[in-house]
Amino acid sequence: MDTSKPICVIGAGFMGSVIATIYARHGYAVRLHDVSAEALASYAQRATPIAESLADAGHPVAAILGQVTTVLNLQAAVDGVFLAHEVAQEDLAVKQALFEQLDRLCPPEVVLGTNTSSFRLTHLCERVQHRERVIGIHYITPAHIIKAVEVIVADFTPPERIAWAHEFLASIDHVGVVCRESPGFLVNRIQLAMLAEIHRIVDEGQATPQDIDAAIRLSLGPRWALWGALLCEDLVVNKRTALAVFDYMQEQTGVDYYASTPTLRDMIARGEQGAISGKGWYDWDATYPDIVRERDRQLKKTLDWLQAEDPVARIGVRPDR
């Protein structure tokens, strides 16, 4: 990735300041733009804790912050950049007007990125002529720690733009996960579905917040941290059992959300049961006993660390509400 040209980050709020600092840490000259002179003036102070967490012997805090230049004029801010990354307020009209302006100011080869957490690219680009250069680059808080970045694409996104996004994110030590434009994209769609169910469990009096969080920290959390959701499913349950649980949940609750999917039924019909059969969501090369031994080794090590560290106590939360 060419670091000779600068990046413009548009929006000096919390997330924009974090993103600008990430880019600066990895060698990019950054122009940080905002309509508020006050927001620009306070950038360095607000970004210092972020820079401190990213700093090392070769990249001291002062050097990281020194890579960022604040620019009040948008035309000057985007002059000569290879990426203009919008991190403005989550207001569709504001973003549409901004992208229309960026499309006029930036040559067609300049990539226009958006950190939107909810809006479709199709809607953002209604007044954009060169919309094939627009792509979602959505960071997840805390963005300087969390490595996954949602790469949001639309029907008009060419394959070379997706490849560019992967290369660019690799250059800042992050990993792009591609998702087609849809409400909630990928992470929020999964996260909000889980939280909605958890909130209902609390409202129904089925469990306390403390017990719910303990269950997640000591079961789902470690497994998903190691392997993700679908690889974990391959590792811990065969697909016929998963189907039976889905069907029972749908029958007992009457909620169609729990109904099993055609994809799951097709996998079962093909004999794809997960790690135990050698194929599920993933292809498995090792023997099942060897897979189980390695699975258990990784999980035990993770849970031993959680027990030794006691992160809940360290973070300073009270044990009771």
Image (tube, rainbow, N blue to C red):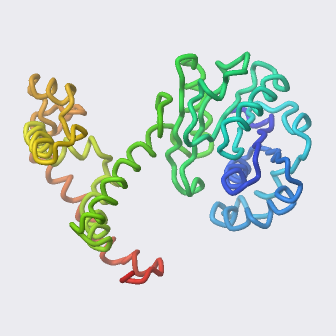
Residue under the point 67% across and 20% down? 131
Query: Residue 112 falls in which quadrant of the image?
Result: top right
In the rendered image, is residue 161 in sight? Answer: yes
Residue under the point 19% across and 41% down? 234
Q: Nearer the viewer, residue 255 or 193?
A: 255
In the rendered image, is residue 302 in sight? Answer: no
Task: From the top left corner, tell me how far across and down residue 252 is, in percent.
Answer: 11, 47
Task: From the top left corner, tell me how far across and down residue 44 is, in percent.
Answer: 80, 62
Q: Please indicate whether residue 146 sits to the left or right of residue 207 in the image.
A: right
When the figure is inspected, residue 255 is found, relative to residue 198, above or below; the finding is above
Residue under the point 64% across and 18% down? 132
When the figure is inspected, residue 286 is found, relative to residue 47, above or below; the finding is above
Q: From the image, which quarter does the C terminus lie in? A: bottom left
Task: From the top left corner, tell me how far across and down residue 60 is, in percent.
Answer: 74, 63
Query: Residue 80 falls in which quadrant of the image?
Result: top right
Task: From the top left corner, tell me how far across and down residue 259 is, in percent.
Answer: 18, 36
Q: Nearer the viewer, residue 20 or 167?
A: 20
